[in-house]
Image (cartoon, rainbow, N blue to C red):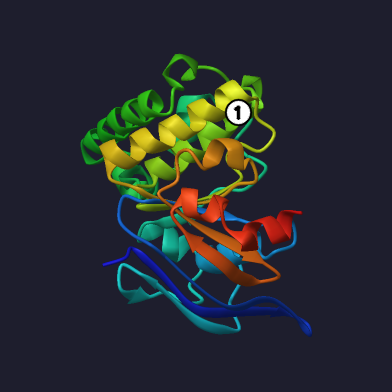
């Protein structure tokens, strides 16, 4: 069963229809790429899936559950969340502190339990252990004590990814994870994504414009233009499709 199924999704802004009966799916442990020119509706689709926007029609199923119109915090709690094109960390906190801040339901948030370490010490240790694993998977382990404002643009993208993993997100929606990143680090980011997919059994839906890099790592591709899916399939098939050439030429 697919982890995500989007069925006949439509979204209007006023009288302008941005998404027109869009249907896509993501299978478990799959990297799905969403491509298309600027203004094609890619980010609007991600916003609808992640709960930032409410679609006007259509259905979003996550692990078989209808989550259409759910708020972002509710979706995050069941394992569905997204990153943004521009990272927004806690700039003065360290990389590790940024990861620890991404957790929720910490026992110490209860004022009565906070006074007694036996209520939260084990949970705190488990968070540290998870953060160490995430830092190694994302290549940020050597930066764990660095303030976030000292990271490069590419490292900030990795930090965004790492914070989703601290939330135990099962389907990660990434909006241009290598946008503005130098080619060497761009490849590193996608290699981290592949490693996370295989080692942590995660799934990804990724918007990306740098097809020369992203296509090498995708399992499946959807091409969007003027709010509609114009072609889909394996990367090599989509790259050779006449529909793709038509929207980029």
Residue 10 location in percent, x, y? 60, 80
Instruction: Look at 70% across and 33% down and name the residue there.
Output: 180
Residue carrying label 1? 154
Can you see residue 155?
A: no
**Is residue 113 found left or right of 160 in the rendered image?**
left
Residue 163 location in percent, x, y? 46, 40
Instruction: Look at 35% across and 61% down and name the residue there.
Output: 78
Instruction: Look at 65% across and 46% down and name the residue there.
Output: 209
Can you see residue 180?
A: yes
Q: Quadrant of the C terminus?
A: bottom right
Nearer to us in this view, 188 or 230: 230
Quadrant housing residue 224: bottom right
Instruction: Look at 60% across and 28% down and name the residue there.
Output: 154
Residue 48 location in percent, x, y? 57, 69
Q: Quadrant of the N terminus?
A: bottom left
Residue 236 location in percent, x, y? 48, 48
**Is residue 233 found left or right of 207 in the rendered image?**
left
**Is residue 213 found left or right of 181 in the rendered image?**
left
Examine the rendered structure and indicate whether residue 89 appears above or below residue 9.
Answer: above
Nearer to us in this view, 59 or 151: 59
Mark 1 crowd level (few <14, some 14–19, many ≥20, 10 Å Cα): many
């Amino acid at each position: 069963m697919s982890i995500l199924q989007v069925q006949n999704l439509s979204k209007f802004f006023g009288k302008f229809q941005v998404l027109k009966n869009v249907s896509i799916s993501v299978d478990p442990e799959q990297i799905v790429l969403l491509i298309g020119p600027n203004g094609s509706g890619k980010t609007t689709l991600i916003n609808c899936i992640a709960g930032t926007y409410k679609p006007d029609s259509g259905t979003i199923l996550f692990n078989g559950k209808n989550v259409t119109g759910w708020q972002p915090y509710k979706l995050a709690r069941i394992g569905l969340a997204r990153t943004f094109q521009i990272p927004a960390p806690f700039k003065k906190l360290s990389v590790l502190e940024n990861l620890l801040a991404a957790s929720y339901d910490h026992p110490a948030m209860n004022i009565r339990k906070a006074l007694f370490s036996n209520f939260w010490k084990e949970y705190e240790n488990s968070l540290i252990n998870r953060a160490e694993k995430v830092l190694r998977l994302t290549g940020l382990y050597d930066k764990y004590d660095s303030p976030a404002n000292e990271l490069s643009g590419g490292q900030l993208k990795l930090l965004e990814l790492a914070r989703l993993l601290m939330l135990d997100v099962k389907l990660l929606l990434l909006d241009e994870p290598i946008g503005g990143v130098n080619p060497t680090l761009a490849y590193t980011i996608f290699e981290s994504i592949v490693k996370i997919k295989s080692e942590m059994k995660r799934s990804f839906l990724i918007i990306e414009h740098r097809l020369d890099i992203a296509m090498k790592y995708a399992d499946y591709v959807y091409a969007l233009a003027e709010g509609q899916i114009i072609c889909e399939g394996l990367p090599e098939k989509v790259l050779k499709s006449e529909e793709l050439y038509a929207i980029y030429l």
